[in-house]
Image (cartoon, rainbow, N blue to C red):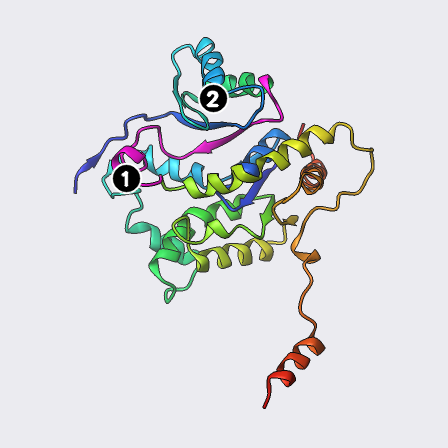
Amino acid sequence: MAKVFIYPTTSLILSDLVARFGHTPLSAAMEIRERVQTPGLESPPLQISPEEPKIGLHWAAVEVPSGVRGRMALYGPMIEQAEAAIIVNDADFSFGCMGCARTNELILFLVRKRGIPVLDLNYPRTEEEGEEFVAAIKQFLDGLGGGK
Amino acid sequence: MKEYAPGYRGTLTKYVFIDSPEMTPSDLAIRAYEISQGVMIKETCFGLMITGKVEDVDRIVVSLRELDPTHIFIKDRGFPPGDPRRCRANLGGARPGFFGHEFEISLIRNISAGLNRLSRREAGKVPCPPSPDTRTKLDASRLKQIIESKEL
């Protein structure tokens, strides 16, 4: 069972397919849960503390905005423990209220720099594309070994 | 600074989305209540949110997925249900994350079709998924033509 980084990190489709084919999806929810379910000092609204931008310095330079560094404190450890990645490139919703364009660029750069197997896709717009999309993900995940 | 004491410590929450011609979210909720054994289940317009201990939630989602495997989709959720930082009742307007789900649910029938056809697919057929590589880029000579046509 491999740990598979998914991008967008909040994707329902990717999270479901990776788990369905027997691997562990690395999604934003796991990191958020770890913070909001851990007792400590209150740091509203998302329990992102002032320590997080400092942790983010591991992946982003000090000149980079603290918002990017704070987000990298969530995504950086996930990228480091990933054994493979599936990236959907035309996910426009990952920018805006859902996230930050610069963080997204840095995430994609770091994933590619790690040298792990990466599957690049676009969202399927037809049922035929859906079949190819699912088949490509299954073939990719089967190649990692340890799945269902 | 105040102390922070989370409400559902040590629990896991999962979303169960259903987009099926044969089942509604309330059918799914009834099945889930039958096997819940103390796990918190919240019915929503798109499916369910299930909160409880990891092994209990996993057991329930595995059972629910079997009801309609190609039309039920499951993902993790960071916040427990009703959390004032995420709940629409407290915020007004769409819940953060709604637009992502709304977009992906609009494409989920293609994934369902893909999962249905997967078992009938010829063994060894090479997948040709939609990918950024297949997008045609503007040719440099064509760009030059456009620039020249606009020059006075």
The answer to whether A90 is drawn above or below residue A63 in the figure is above
Residue B131 vs residue B108: left or right?
A: right
Subunit that carries the residue with mark 1: B
Which image quadrant for residue A24?
top right
Q: Is residue B76 highlighted in magenta?
A: yes
The amino acid on which the numbered mark 2 sits, given as a three-letter code, is Pro
Residue A103 vs residue B19: left or right?
A: left
Q: Position of residue A30 (x, y in %)?
A: 44, 36
Q: Residues within 10 Å of mark 2 (few under 14, many from 20)?
A: some
Task: Residue at 68%, 34% (x, y): give it.
Answer: B114
Count of numbered badges drawn on the protein: 2
Q: Position of residue A132 (x, y in %)?
A: 71, 41
Question: Which element is circle 1 on?
Answer: loop
Residue stretch rendered in magenta on the structure: B67-94
Question: Which element is circle 2 on?
Answer: helix
Q: Is residue B31 visible?
A: yes
The answer to whether A7 is drawn above or below residue B14 in the figure is below
Q: Nearer the viewer, residue A55 or B12?
A: B12
Q: Is residue B118 highlighted in magenta?
A: no
Subunit that carries the residue with mark 2: B
The amino acid on which the numbered mark 1 sits, given as a three-letter code, is Gly
Q: Position of residue B96 (x, y in %)?
A: 37, 42
Mark 2, residue position: B25
Q: Residues within 10 Å of mark 1 (few under 14, many from 20)?
A: few
Which image quadrant for residue B90?
top left
Which image quadrant for residue A13?
top right
Mark 1, residue position: B92
Please tell me which of labels 2 and 1 falls first in the chain: 2
